[in-house]
Image (tube, rainbow, N blue to C red):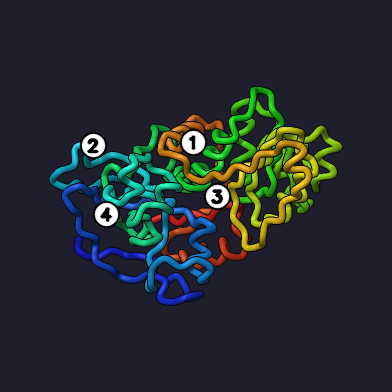
Amino acid sequence: MSQMKAAVISEVNGPWVLEDRPVPEVGPNDVLVRIHASGICGTDVWISNGTLSFKEFPLILGHESVGEVVGVGSSVTSRKVGDRVGIPMHQKTCGVCDFCREGHPISFVSAVNCANPTLTGVNVDGGFAEFIAADANGTVQLPDGISYEDAAPTMCAGYTVWSGLRRADAKPGAKIAVVGIGGLGHLAIQYAKAVGYHVTAVTRTPVKDELAREFGADDVVADGAALKDAGGADVLMHTSSSHAAVVDAMTGLKPWGKVAMIGIATDEVALPAGPVTFQSYQIIGSAHNGTEYLVEALDFVARGIVKPMVDVYPKERVGDAYEAAATSTARLRAVVTF
C-alpha cells in the first residue's frame, strides 16, 4: 500500500479533511504503525486555531495515537511486527545539544529545552492518519486488556494527570481537590481515588456535580470558600482551562499545601502572594514527567480501575470529532478510529 487516508488541516481554523497521502517511509530506527485510534487533545485544538504554532500548515496533528506495528526498520530490536503500541508526543531528543548532553530523561522538560526534539503531531506528522512512522524507542507497548479507544486518551490526558499526581507526592490519606471536571479532571478524580485519596471536585457547572460523583469524587463544591468549609485540600490539581478558577480554589488549600499546575489556559495567573508566603504553599509545574508514568497510567486503565469517557468517531467523521472537541460538546474526550 502506497497511499493512506490522513486528516489534513490546510490553514489556521481550517476544516479537518480526509486526504490521500503517501504512507510514510520507515527509517532504520523506526517502526511503521497502523493507527487504530487517535484522541483529540486541547493542544490539537490550539494548534488548529492558531493559538499555538510550531510548524507551517498544512498539518497532520495527533499525539494520542495507538495502533499495531506493521513494519520495523533494519536496526530495530525493541519492537516487532504485531506489537500494540502508543506514540506519545515526545518521541526523542536530538541527543547532541547542550541540554541533551546533560543526560536528562524523556519528559516535557526535555521537549521544550532540547534544541531539536521530535514531537509527534507538533513538529512532525502525527497520528490522525492510517499510518505513522515513529522512532521505535519513542513508542510505548500497550498492556494486555486495554482497548485502543481507551488507550488513546491515556497517551496524553491520562499520562498528564497521573504524572501530576505523582509529582505532588501527597501523603497517604491526603485530601486532593480536582479543579475542572473535563477531559483531564474526570481522569484525575479516578486516578486519585485509585490510590486511596479523599477527592473533592471543584466545578461551577451544576450538571457536572453528579458526573464527578460517578467518577468517584467524595465531595463536590463550587469554589474555594466551599472547599475550605468542606475541610480543605492538601493538593489542588489544576485541570481547568481557567487559571482564575484555580487561584480561587486556593482559598481552600490547607497550610503547606501544593498546587499541581497541569491544565493550560490563556488567562494570566495572579497568585495570592500573602497566602503563598505565609502558608508555605508550593506551586508545582507538571506535564509528562517521564515514560514510567505513562506505563503506570496505562496499567490503571488496562485493569479497569480508571475508565476514560470518550465519544468515538470513524475517520470519515474526523471533522465532526474536531468540532465536538473544540466546542466542548464531546463527552469529555473525542477519539477517532482509523
Labelled pair 3, 1 in contact (Cβ < 8 Å): no
Q: Mark 2 or mark 3: which is in front?
A: 2
What is the CA distance from the residue labelled 3 to the residue labelled 4?
Answer: 26 Å
Say which label, 3 or 4, has the lower sequence index: 4
The residue beneath circle 3 is: 310
**Where does the image place residue 1, in percent across and percent down from the top left?**
20, 60
Q: Name the foreground residue: 248 vs 127.
A: 248
Secondary structure at badge 1 equals helix
Image spot of residue 288 (x, y percent): 47, 44
Drawn side of residue 185 relative to residue 24, left or right? right
- Where residue 133 is drawn, which disc sits there? 4
Q: Disc 3 marks which amino acid?
A: Val
What residue is drawn where x is 42% and y is 34%? 292
- Work out whether 16 lies above or below 76: below
* Residue at disc 2, secondary structure: loop
Q: Mark 4 or 1 closer to N-term?
A: 4
Q: Badge 4: few (under 14), some or many (20 or more) residues near its Cα, within 10 Å?
A: many
Residue at the spot of label 1: 297
Q: Which residue is mark 2?
A: 78
Point 43% across, 39% down: residue: 290
Which is nearer the N-term, disc 3 or disc 1?
A: 1
